[in-house]
């Protein structure tokens, strides 16, 4: 067995067993209290720093800043994979990268648009690819395709009990590229597209079925081969409003999985858009076990994130030095939630995130690499990067914490 992890770094799953704290996290108390008086605990610093009781101020960890340690303190970013980093491809997120001590390489598994197409074809042309780099931030060089179309929202995890490398994703990932032809794509763009909107000309009809599911591929080696485990097993009799799309797994040393998933984002009431409380929590005894819904402390048993005014999707879940964290896509930036026990959550409505690259851009599919303290060592997001007005090219962008004196 080769232990695949960062040198002196932690990855998802390489954390202490889940400890359920007594009581619950005060809902929304952190940001509300700090608007009126001094902090009294790390909860008021979003678990991203310590509260200096003497001064009543938060002392923030690396990668965070601000009065409640809720603002990302990161550099201007650079391309990691896809358009601008790797020629002729578009990428819509992936990771976190994993270090292989034998090859001395960092391995990235990411969503790439097949056929050199752009993001407007994501619903039929997404595939999982393997890329490598000498550093955690990249740029990563493409090795091969590991999951064919249709496979989106690629998320790497590791199961220590059976030593399996895992890729969680949406859709079935069981069709060859030829099933969904779009033959005129070049340079990671789709001619005639407008951002995420497909070209106005009629698309060729898919010649193979596209399975709408949350699925897992697994392998004994980072080099593959990868095999499909099919759709994850969801417990029966769950409410119709819960969902497990865009899965974010956290695997513990005993093999237990804590996973966040997403349901429907928006409900229209009398023509007005309302953002749903749509992030739900699941637990399974193992990655290939049955995923049971764990009601949390939000509306309708959802995770207590979101306020009905901004979207919350694309969770990335991890355990840091003081507790659990989640970053979410909250268009066009990110938002942050925190928890002592992983079950009861607090969330800040003060949106954070990297600066947008251009007007109309977006930051989605966040992933984090962690250092030995459980702090963010690198933040990865997917973003649209047009090379000319109206096209739909995209890439994986990486941001590092700003150095501190």
Image (cartoon, helix red, strand yellow):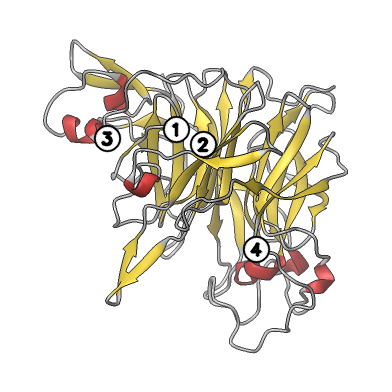
Q: For the residues marked 2 and 3, what is the alpha-carbon distance in whole angstroms?
A: 19 Å
**Looking at the rendered structure, which numbered label has been put on residue 212?**
4
Secondary structure of the residue carrying numbered label 2: strand
Q: For the residues marked 3 and 1, what is the alpha-carbon distance in whole angstroms?
A: 15 Å
**Looking at the rendered structure, which numbered label has been put on residue 325?**
1
Q: Camera-side residue: 76 or 35?
A: 35
Dot 2: few (<14), some (14–19), or many (≥20) neighbours within 10 Å?
Answer: many
**Looking at the rendered structure, which numbered label has been put on residue 30?**
none
Secondary structure of the residue carrying numbered label 4: loop
Closer mark to the observer between disc 3 and disc 1: 3
Q: Camera-side residue: 65 or 223?
A: 223
Name the quadrant containing residue 298. Answer: top left
Quadrant of the drawing holding the N terminus = top right
Quadrant of the drawing holding the C terminus = top left
Nearer-N-terminus badge (3/4):
3
- Residue that label 2 marks: 317
- Residue that label 3 marks: 27
Specify whether 115 is left or right of 271. right
- Tell me residue 88's x, y (percent): 73, 63
Name the quadrant containing residue 221. Answer: top right
């Amino acid at each position: 067995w080769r232990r695949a992890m960062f040198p002196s770094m932690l990855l998802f799953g390489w954390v202490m067993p889940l400890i359920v704290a007594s009581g619950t996290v005060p809902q929304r108390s952190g940001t509300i209290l700090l608007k009126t008086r001094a902090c009294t605990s790390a909860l008021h610093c979003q678990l991203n720093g310590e509260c200096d009781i003497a001064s009543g101020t938060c002392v923030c960890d690396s990668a965070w800043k601000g009065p409640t340690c809720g603002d990302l303190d990161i550099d201007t970013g650079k391309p990691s994979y896809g358009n601008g980093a790797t020629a002729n491809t578009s990428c819509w997120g992936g990771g976190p990268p994993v270090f292989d001590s034998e090859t001395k390489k960092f391995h990235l598994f990411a969503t790439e648009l097949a056929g050199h197409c752009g993001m407007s074809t994501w619903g039929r042309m997404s595939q999982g690819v393997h890329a490598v780099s000498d550093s955690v931030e990249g740029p990563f060089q493409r090795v091969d395709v590991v999951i064919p179309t249709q496979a989106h929202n690629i998320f790497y995890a590791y199961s220590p009990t059976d030593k399996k490398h895992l890729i969680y994703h949406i859709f079935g990932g069981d069709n060859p590229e030829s099933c969904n032809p779009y033959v005129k794509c070049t340079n990671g763009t789709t001619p005639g597209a407008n951002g995420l909107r497909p070209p106005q000309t009629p698309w060729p009809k898919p010649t193979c079925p596209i399975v709408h599911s949350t699925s897992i591929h697994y392998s004994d080696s980072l080099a593959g081969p990868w095999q499909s485990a099919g759709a994850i097993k969801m417990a029966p009799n769950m409410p119709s409003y819960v969902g497990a799309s865009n899965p974010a797994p956290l695997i513990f040393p005993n093999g237990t999985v804590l996973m966040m998933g997403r349901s429907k984002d928006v409900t229209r009431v009398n023509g007005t858009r309302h953002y749903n409380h749509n992030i739900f929590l699941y637990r399974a005894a193992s990655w290939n076990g049955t995923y049971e819904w764990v009601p949390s402390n939000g509306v309708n048993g959802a995770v207590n994130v979101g306020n009905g005014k901004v979207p919350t999707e694309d969770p990335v879940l991890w355990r840091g030095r003081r507790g659990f964290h989640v970053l979410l896509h909250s268009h066009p930036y990110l938002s942050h939630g925190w928890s002592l026990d992983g079950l009861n959550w607090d969330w800040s409505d003060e949106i954070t995130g990297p600066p947008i690259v251009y007007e109309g851009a977006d930051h989605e599919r966040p992933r984090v690499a962690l250092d030995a303290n459980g702090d963010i060592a690198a933040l990865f997001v997917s973003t649209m990067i047009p090379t000319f007005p109206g096209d739909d090219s995209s890439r994986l962008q990486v941001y590092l914490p700003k150095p501190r004196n």
